[in-house]
Amino acid sequence: MLDVILLGTGGMMPLPKRFLTSLYVELEGKAIVVDCGEGTQVAMRRADCKMSRVELLLVTHFHADHISGLPGLLLSLGNGGKTGKLVIAGPRGLRRIVEALTIICPGLPFEVEIREIDTREPSSFEFGGEADKSKNHANTPIFEITCLPMRHRIACLGYFLELKRPPVFDPERAKELEIPVKFYRTLHSGEAVTLPDGRVITTSMVTKGERKPVKIGYCTDSAPFSAIADFAHEADLFICEGMYADDAMRERMEDKKHMLFSDAAKLAKSANVRELWLTHFSPAELNPKDGLSAVRKIFANTVVPFDGYRKELIK
Amino acid sequence: MLDVILLGTGGMMPLPKRFLTSLYVELEGKAIVVDCGEGTQVAMRRADCKMSRVELLLVTHFHADHISGLPGLLLSLGNGGKTGKLVIAGPRGLRRIVEALTIICPGLPFEVEIREIDTREPSSFEFGGEADKSKNHANTPIFEITCLPMRHRIACLGYFLELKRPPVFDPERAKELEIPVKFYRTLHSGEAVTLPDGRVITTSMVTKGERKPVKIGYCTDSAPFSAIADFAHEADLFICEGMYADDAMRERMEDKKHMLFSDAAKLAKSANVRELWLTHFSPAELNPKDGLSAVRKIFANTVVPFDGYRKELIK
């Protein structure tokens, strides 16, 4: 089960009825959080997220509405029973920011590893279970995380999470190869087996071939530019900022290096994504849902989510 | 009008339905905030507090639930139109903490003055309008703020805010002195006047004598000790932590250096305060109101407030 929860939908400042934009992704008991403005720990509690499961925190940039909740979140992860390592990844300068903000949370019960990411060009890294190269594929799920430099007022990264999916086990092929059923489970998990007759069977011999990865894009804050669509290409879910529904705000958003609903929808269309969730609404955008019918004329499968909006991308 | 708002009632961590303990006091367009854990800016918006009016922020101590909302609060004060100086006062080490946390809020549109307070012994300072000693009393209200070292796991201060009230103008005495009515307003404001006949009239000649100051105490986090009652003596409002209603939690609270409802009530009784508000409830104390009848047997005028509970101490 790949569970995706948009914890909040607000930009700039938290409001009494709107948490700041943050994403929670959980798969098989391992969770990734993207951004943690003030109140993210509360939004996580409200959405029944498991604090102890967070293993990776991705930070887009260092504007307060994306990171001011860090000390409280770290303390709550500890109070929630987390003991394993937390990786925090974000633009260069991350270590200095984390060290400063965590002055009020000494003695965390888990290790924090800082991973600073270049914001001059796209890069990627893997997150997930031990990728054992001696096997045909890893036993535990792996996310390939691609980091795309955004065009904002300060260094900022968009993130694309791709979940590599192991090929589907094909019992018909296993039967043709006369493999005893007791080996199916091992083969299914990705390990090769040696049969009693001496034959070595690898997983690729009993699976249906590669499956398309599940892809989630998260882009905020940025002016729109075409490479976003290239990186979001055919994403299953594209989460993108839209500060205002009204195109009359264009000039102001260009100055501030933010997007309008229509910018996000054009990127979604160009990228041919499956679904677009708008987020990071301006505090002045009181009823973002009012902009939905207009933006759906550009990209039909657009959602204007509420805080805590969720979807199981894999059942 | 002296408006007192308990912005939140929670301790340790913010909850979906409970903000962290913080106090907002406003008088004649000048406001004081005491403590600012994560979410205080949201609680202020919810309570319709005016961001631009905050001139003094008192910090009790540096546990995250009392200060993690600082960056967001400062940014919101600026976004709310604040341009005048903000004084932040708190235990020694405050400058280092504020400098660290404000790494994510550069370029604030107002000056911040840090005032570090000794936590080894009680001290006090004045906050308020210019105290013009050439007048009989100041034109603008002055708070005398007394800082009492608490007994917590780290250095912590309780605060006692005393509003000095100018004497009430007495038109009868003015009439007896045959002072023309046109001078009443000036005398009422505290200024002396020279009459056409050469007599110099000071405010004290036409007022009814000193009035008792209005006193508000705010004590959290601490183990109970008798000096708290001495300093809270006859306070109009005593806001005091009570982590749990159940006295069975005594041993654990002694370890953690916190109070139970009954500790706070005993202090309120001993101090002969007018009214007690409990606060800083443990996240595990789901229904603090359930403890009210028991605690009222110790001190009758106890309130178990909800977030945003407010009172006009002076109409």
Image (cartoon, coloured by chain):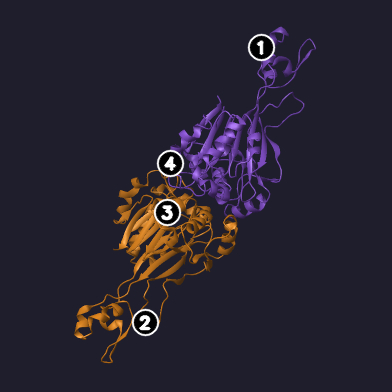
Chain colours: A purple, B orange
Q: Is residue A116 left or right of residue B184?
A: right
Which is nearer the eye, B81 or A16? B81
Residue type at mark 4: give it.
Asn
| Residue to which mark 4 is pinned | A287
* Secondary structure found at label 4: loop
> Where B192 sits versus A106, above or below?
below
Circle 2: element type? loop
Q: Sequence-wise, which precedes: disc 1 or disc 4?
A: 1
Q: Nearer the viewer, mark 1 or mark 4?
A: 4
Residue A171: which numbered mark, if any?
1
- Residue of label 2: B135
Tell me where residue A89 appears, x and y as whole percent. 65, 44
Q: Which residue is mark 3?
A: B44
**Badge 4 sits on which subunit?**
A
Say what secondary structure mark 3 lies in: helix
CA gap, disc 2 to disc 1?
Answer: 96 Å
